[in-house]
Image (cartoon, rainbow, N blue to C red):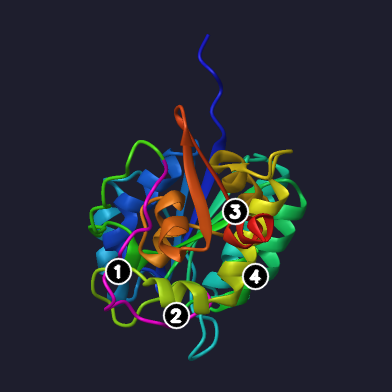
Amino acid sequence: MIEKQPRIALLIDADNSPASKIDVILAELAKVGVTNIRRAYGNWKKDGLKGWEAVLHEYAIRPVQQFDYSKGKNATDMGMVIEAMDLLYTDQPDAFGIVSSDADFTPLVMHLKAKGAQVFGFGAKKTPLPFVNACSRFLYLEHLGQPVAVDEPREAKGAKAAKPKPKAATQGGNGVGNGDAAPSRLDTGALRQDARLVTLLRNAVESAAGEDGWSALGAVGQQIGNQASFDPRNYGYRKLLDLIEATQLFELDRRGTQFVLRDKRLAKAGAG
């Protein structure tokens, strides 16, 4: 018997999003479930949406016309909100994908999550933090579809701290680099300066700890996912383990096929 996959409704603010990223957006959502509702909103009379027109049929995305009722403003945001609410109570998808860099969608995201739906956000690095943090998970479009630096090989017993390139940007908060080129890895110093990240990791490791003081990596990842919108790729790392190694804040050990970790401060306290 085939297991039923979660159903996802993808709503795209075409006025605010690049059509060139649609393939990687759909690939990300495919990891979660099946995107059986796909809609793109905008004023299709505008030349700026020609890029989206070229991919609508290829990716089975339904265009939804939103006229600009006031000069200098567009009705796309309101149209997306109305349809999202309609879908929530009629089709009842398990999750929503919201593609936009507009913080005006923050209340909508909070409501969808309160009603039990996951929300996966996609937007530019300029996206305001309230919208980013409200999502179940948010990915910067500049970090999708770009090559990520190859990770150093790990030893079978434990893992050495990664040595990322030091040229990464040091802008804190969400692992956002400068410029629109391929994403740079934040180095150890920059990661440690990100107070939100450090607190998030330490709290998750502490919450997932067993009686021996060690936390399974899988449990840590689940704790983080329950707490905040988070993806290691926003910091330039392919996996959570790679990011944790780079912070050099935790001891890592490999037990069979599983990685475990603990706060280095705990180890020092035990030795003292």
Q: Which comes before the other along the chain, label 2 or label 3?
A: 3
Q: Amino acid at mark 1?
A: Pro
Indicate the position of residue 72 as horizontal and vertical percent values: 48, 91
Question: Is residue 164 in the magenta section?
Answer: yes
Amino acid type, mark 4: Thr
Q: Residues within 10 Å of mark 1 (few under 14, many from 20)?
A: many
Which residue matches tag 2? 126
Residue topped by disc 3: 119
Residue 236 included in the magenta stretch of the image: no
Kind of residue indicated by mark 3: Val
Residue 205 rendering spot, x and y as whole percentages = 64, 52
Dot 4 corresponds to which residue? 106
Q: Secondary structure at mark 2?
A: loop
- Mark 4 or 2, nearer chain start: 4
Q: Main secondary structure of the magenta part?
A: loop
Q: Is residue 232 left or right of residue 262?
A: left
Mark closer to the observer (1, 3): 1
